[in-house]
Image (tube, grey):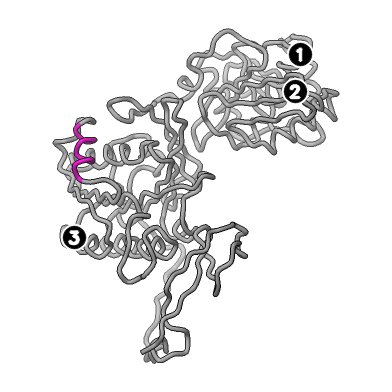
Amino acid sequence: MARSAVQFVCQSCGGAHPKWSGKCEACGEWNTLVEESVSAPVGTQATKPKTRKPGRGIEFVDLGAETEDAPRFSTGVSELDRVLGGGLVPGSAVLIGGDPGIGKSTLLLQAMASLASDGVRTAYISGEEAVDQVRRRAKRLGLSDSPVALASETALEPTLDALKRDKPQVVVVDSIQTLWTDQLAAAPGTVAQVRACSQELVRFAKRRNAAVILVGHVTKEGQIAGPRVVEHMVDAVIYFEGERAHQFRLLRSVKNRFGPTDEIGVFEMSEQGLTVVENPSALFLDGRGEPAPGSAVFAGMEGARPVLVEIQALVASAAFGTPRRAVVGWDSGRLAMVLAVLEARCGLGFGQRDVYLNVAGGLKISEPAADLAVAAALASSVFDVALPADCAAFGEISLSGEVRPVGRADARMKEAAKLGFQRAIAPVSPDSGANLSVLGVKTLADLVAMVEAGQFGEY
């Protein structure tokens, strides 16, 4: 009999080490190594590969052959279908992550109830909640009459046996960190268990042509907990984001083999569950009062959808020796670059000033097109001059102070015009036909001069 062996696996990156240490040499994280049992060492009788007779091997096909579009199950939740690219694809695996209590289980329960009402065989397997807890949530949401097959189980083998027996078309596993297989001695939630259980569920989805949705926990940094290999195994990775202080939630796609990435869906949390928000721009700008210094409206793009959001900036004298830089909803490194360009190219000093930047509504912006709106909000706060209420801004700033054009400018301005905006601070470009007066700026110094003078006509 081959002797057993142990190794120490990092719970952050999945790296294996022969002995324990305080720091993982692969990713640099501290106190993440956990002891796990492994199979017999390579070279023993138990691990010698069996000889295989040569066969025909794999068959290759022509790259230009006709391929039909993948059929989809419409979940009945328009924003979820939008993020997935049109619905769930049979035989696919989807990974959804988000903070605790953000609404993942509520969203998936609503989607499963809608699918079941349309005649799709669905199964909801909860490893974190008892059956009675899920039933109470369904009753509160008004979904008790939906024919969803419900179970509470954490063992992988009985779960797979039940799925192979009942043959559901759509399966939800909430969550993957609670599943464990008796083939491994590791505890549930460890890297080995998460990887093994995910691999078996993905294999089930491919072989049985069922759509499997896995719910994943997230770390304090907002990333899905466990090894990154799980994100590579699944077909789509979706993050459910939002702030508890705000009533809306964002569903963001970061990987999708059957649709676009960087797409978002917007929901509003209420007592009746999650409701779809048809016009996110109106929601993000809701409650915006009279024009005030330090406020600018950014016309951004989230996937194929234009979204308008308010950017708020406050520049104040530093109360202590070291000035503060606080950012919510934007990249702090990008803010440092914009401040450096404003100081070097426009003569605005921030060395003795605190800078606070906030994206209203809790939306997280990542595209460089927000540079010009951020700079406009900062200049507005420095000069104590309010920007016009009917003016939106977008554009990328280079280190030389030049304002560069960005993609989808026409869609951005059309969305602004639809919400009643009449002017746009943007890079100099031909008229887009969006019925907006474009205040073209070539350099960041042009924007600062415009804000300082308080003249927002044709510049």
Residue that appears at 40% across and 47% down: 96
Residue 358 sits in which quadrant?
Answer: top right
User: Looking at the image, is mark 2 or mark 1 earlier in the sequence?
Assistant: 1
Percent coordinates x, y for residue 56 in the rendering: 37, 84
Q: Which mark is residue 441?
A: 2
Percent coordinates x, y for residue 109 in the rendering: 27, 40
Pointer 3 residue: 162
User: Looking at the image, is mark 2 or mark 3 earlier in the sequence?
Assistant: 3
Residue 332 sits in which quadrant?
Answer: top right
Is residue 136 shown in magenta? yes
Magenta region: 131-139
Residue that appears at 38% across and 63% down: 187
Please tell me whether the stretch drawn in magenta is mainly helix, strand or loop.
helix
- Viewer-closest of 208 and 260: 208
Percent coordinates x, y for residue 289 in the rendering: 54, 10
User: Looking at the image, is mark 1 or mark 3 earlier in the sequence?
Assistant: 3
Q: Secondary structure at mark 1?
A: helix
User: What distance separates the C-alpha of mark 1 from that of mark 3?
Assistant: 67 Å
Q: Secondary structure at mark 2?
A: strand
Is residue 124 shown in magenta? no
Q: Amino acid at mark 2?
A: Val
Residue 387 sits in which quadrant?
Answer: top right
User: What distance separates the C-alpha of mark 2 from that of mark 3?
Assistant: 63 Å
Residue that appears at 74% across and 9% down: 455
Pointer 1 residue: 383
- Give the crowd class for mark 3: few <14, some 14-19, many >=20 residues within 10 Å: few
Residue that appears at 16% across and 36% down: 144
Q: Nearer the viewer, mark 2 or mark 1?
A: 1
